[in-house]
Image (cartoon, grey):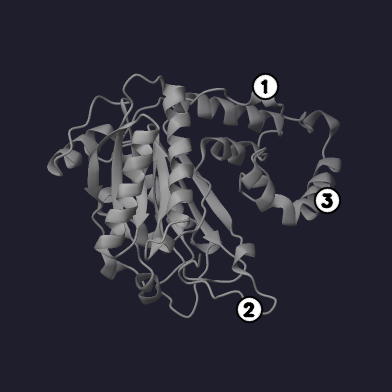
Amino acid sequence: MTIPGFPRRQGLYDPQYEKDSCGIGFVVNIKGKKSHDIVRKGLQVLENLTHRGAQGCDPCTGDGAGILLQVPHTFLKRVAGDAGVSLPEVGEYGVGQLFLPPDADSRRLCEKLFTEILAGEGLRLLGWRDVPVKSDQIGAQARTTEPFMRQIFIARDALNEAQFERKLYVVRKRVEKAVAESAVQGREHFYVSSLSAHTIVYKGLLLPHQMAAYYQDLTDERMVSALARGSTRVPPARKTTWSFRHARKSGCRWAMAIRSCSTASCRAAMAGRTRSSTARRTRRLSALPSARVAAPITASAMPSSMPSPIEVLALLSQLRERRGGGWGSSGHCC
């Protein structure tokens, strides 16, 4: 399967080896209070990370930017209702942010596959919603491969919180595989940005300042969250594709905070720079007084369930103390 914007395999070039790295910023209300102000500040942090991204021949097309937020229940209940979807109480449903093929017939086939897999996993579909976007706010190159944005809502029913999150993960992997192996025209546009009862990700082939202009949801005052994590990427060679991989899985989110990740995706992403990073870190630690050298972080330090924003801050504060009171001169947490 080809990826929109990537050249075909030729000579020494193979698109499967494309990688990207991100600049990341994090804003949180320490008391766990949700507000639109946190969303605005998260978008501002994202704009401040513009230097971590890149542009090509089209100055209005970036390499990708995104923001992760808590699921805004009040906002979604209202806009889903406008789309004819009745949502249950907060935490009783999951929401998926999807990229779909621009062609309507192809979209329906992808949605049909998604619905069939949901039923096969014993989950109940609540409905769909078109995500309002302004395509005239992005670059010409980005528009050539722009997908269609939709949200899917899935009922939790009898599952507990942990079971539901695991089930959503299985559904996402199954759907991605089924669409990739199907004969649907334009299937290369299909991508699941997020699928969770806790968080939602808005992202795209955008410059950081284009996020709020493109996604109309982000400017709505009812869009609230107690945390916001923005990221922008820079691949080794610029390619105009929307289906890039920002870290958005729960395991990877925590790994970003503690500079360590045990998941296969993170190990693969880090493989190319392990030696140089280890050497630099060793030199920095050897220059510090022994009392400031942190002990290795073990698996027991990792949270076993979805944490609250306050627990996030507690973990980050603990790590900061163990590192001697600061994140280091680079200003980045990973």
When the figure is inspected, residue 121 is found, relative to residue 173, above or below; the finding is above
Of residues 316 and 88, the one drawn nearer to the viewer in this rendering: 88
Of residues 166 and 259, the one drawn nearer to the viewer in this rendering: 166
- Left/right placement of residue 295 relative to residue 306 reads right
Residue underneath mark 1: 300
Circle nearer the viewer, 1 or 2: 2
Residue underneath mark 3: 279
Circle 1 — which element?
helix
Question: What's the amino acid at mark 3?
Answer: Ala
Rendered residue at 76%/51% (across/down): 274
Residue underneath mark 2: 10
Of residues 119 and 55, the one drawn nearer to the viewer in this rendering: 119
In the image, residue 213 lies at what x, y percent?
29, 60
Of residues 168 and 303, the one drawn nearer to the viewer in this rendering: 168
1 or 2: tag closer to the N-terminus? 2
Question: What's the amino acid at mark 1?
Answer: Ser
Circle nearer the viewer, 2 or 3: 2
Circle 2 — which element?
loop
When the figure is inspected, residue 152 is found, relative to residue 131, above or below; the finding is above
Circle 3 — which element?
helix
Q: In which quarter of the image is residue 156?
A: top left
2 or 3: tag closer to the N-terminus? 2
Label 1 to label 3: alpha-carbon separation: 26 Å
Rendered residue at 18%/42% (across/down): 79
Rendered residue at 61%/48% (across/down): 332
1 or 3: tag closer to the N-terminus? 3
In the image, residue 77 lies at what x, y percent?
20, 35
Q: Residues within 10 Å of mark 1 (few under 14, many from 20)?
A: few
